[in-house]
Amino acid sequence: MLCLLPLFTGCAVFESRDVGVTTIVTRPGEAAASKVIADFGLIGRVLVKADKRGFSGGVHWQHTADSDEILLLSPLGQTVAHIDRGPEGVRLITSEQKTYYASNVENLTEDVLGWRLPLAGLQFWILGTHFPLTMSEKDLDTTGRTVAIRQDGWRITYLDYFSQPVPAYNLPRVLELSRIDLKLKLVIDNWKIRD
């Protein structure tokens, strides 16, 4: 009996070390975060794997509370798509200078590019928090950083954070968004935060 006691004790210690993630369930309308950044810019790279098509290249994104401007760039730096979102809707201009319009980015990118850019949620997920208007599950590590979010059919996994946080913010460096038919990986090289 005494020989078995160290085995059980060892298992208990191992299990408590393994459990380092806390899951928080949020209901629609609950605050997204105590510090939500209204305006930001980022430069990075994106890899998209979809049923219909894929994409690999650079991304430049300028975001404000009322608008988004996103440039998707080829590996050589040419603009593949220029996406503008404003109060009047969304415009997408391709590298062939064809212009398309829609009421939301998700449908427009799916129709024109062959894959869905979930901008409504992404403007929050990119900051490590959830979209506040739908239910979500958020996993936090022992330091309070987001490890994963499950929301609106998407799983967002945070693979790396910047070691030197932008003042007052702990910003992701690498994240992966996935759902049944689509996977996006974002690597952020540079953040610009405007409070």
Image: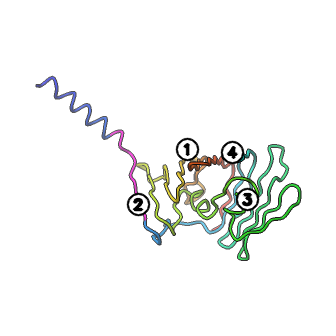
* Callout 4 amino acid: Leu
Nearer to us: label 2 or label 3: 3
Q: Which mark is residue 25?
A: 2
Mark earlier in primary sequence (1, 3): 3
The range drawn in magenta is 17-26
Q: Secondary structure at mark 2?
A: strand
Residue bearing mark 3: 111
Q: Residues within 10 Å of mark 4 (few under 14, many from 20)?
A: some
Query: Picture coordinates of residue 58 (x, y %)?
Result: 75, 48
Q: Which mark is residue 47?
A: 4
Query: Picture coordinates of residue 107 (x, y %)?
Result: 68, 63
Q: Is residue 22 left or right of residue 66?
A: left
Nearer to us: label 1 or label 4: 4
Nearer to us: label 1 or label 3: 3
Q: Is residue 9 above or below residue 177?
A: above
* Callout 1 amino acid: Leu
Q: Secondary structure at mark 1?
A: strand
User: Which of the 4 image quadrants contains residue 64?
Assistant: bottom right
Q: Is residue 23 left or right of residue 103?
A: left
Q: Are marks 1 and 4 in contact (CB under 8 Å)?
A: no
Q: Residues within 10 Å of mark 2 (few under 14, many from 20)?
A: few
Mark earlier in primary sequence (4, 2): 2
User: Which of the 4 image quadrants contains residue 12?
Assistant: top left
x 38%, y 45%: residue: 20
Camera-side residue: 65 or 136?
136
Mark earlier in primary sequence (1, 4): 4
x 66%, y 46%: residue: 51
* Callout 2 amino acid: Val
Residue 71 lies in the magenta-colored region: no
